[in-house]
Image (spheres, helix red, strand yellow):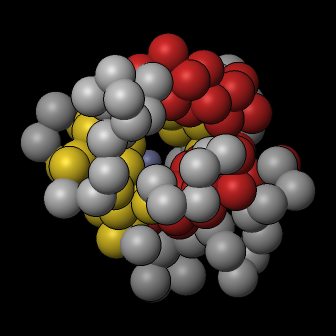
Amino acid sequence: MFELKVVTYFAASHQLKMVAKKCENLHGHNWEIEVCVAGENLNDAGILVDFGELKHNVSEIMTTLDNKFLNELEYFDDSNPPSSENIAKYIANSLQTMLKDQKIKVTSVTAWESENACATYLM
Ligand SMILES: [Zn+2]
């Protein structure tokens, strides 16, 4: 198996209800996003998937998140709040539907919400 990773960023705000039912204050993060895709077969040029295509697809997903109040996006709601966990899942599922080559699988998306805290969604 070969795995490729691209790293990108977006800035947005969210508000999460914490376990104690006390609403966390509205706040923002500069999320760092790591996207991994994998596959077994390389093309004639020796590549799994063109980095340009991968980055283009990922940046299209980033435009749906960048500078947004994430709670207001259609994808997120009270049962699927915009936590780093659910953001990672959203990016993973969105990217998988965008990839033309069905043999290329998104394997994981990691959303870093700070320098030392991240959530990973494994497909
Ligand atoms: Zn937060």
Frontmost residue, 108 versus 116: 108
Question: Is residue 4 something that shows in the picture?
Answer: yes
Name the image quarter holding residue 48: top left
Frontmost residue, 61 versus 81: 61
- Outermost left residue: 116
Q: Quadrant of the N terminus?
A: bottom left
- Outermost top residue: 52
Q: Quadrant of the C terminus?
A: bottom left
- Outermost front residue: 44
Question: Is residue 55 something that shows in the picture?
Answer: no
- Residue 27 lies, in percent from the top left, at 52, 37
Q: Residue at x 50, y 29 (%)?
A: 54
Q: Is residue 93 above or below residue 100?
A: below
- Residue 73 lies, in percent from the top left, at 82, 49
Name the image quarter holding residue 116: top left
Q: Residue at x 46, y 54 (%)?
A: 104
- Residue 2 lies, in percent from the top left, at 20, 49
Give the number of callouts. Answer: 0
Q: Is residue 99 above or below residue 83?
A: above
Q: Residue at x 62, y 30 (%)?
A: 57
Q: Residue at x 59, y 60 (%)?
A: 102
Image-based side of 31 in relation to 80, left or right: left
- Outermost right residue: 74
- Residue 13 lies, in percent from the top left, at 60, 36
Image-based side of 21 in relation to 38, left or right: right
Image-based side of 21 in relation to 2, left or right: right
Frontmost residue, 98 versus 44: 44
Frontmost residue, 94 versus 72: 94
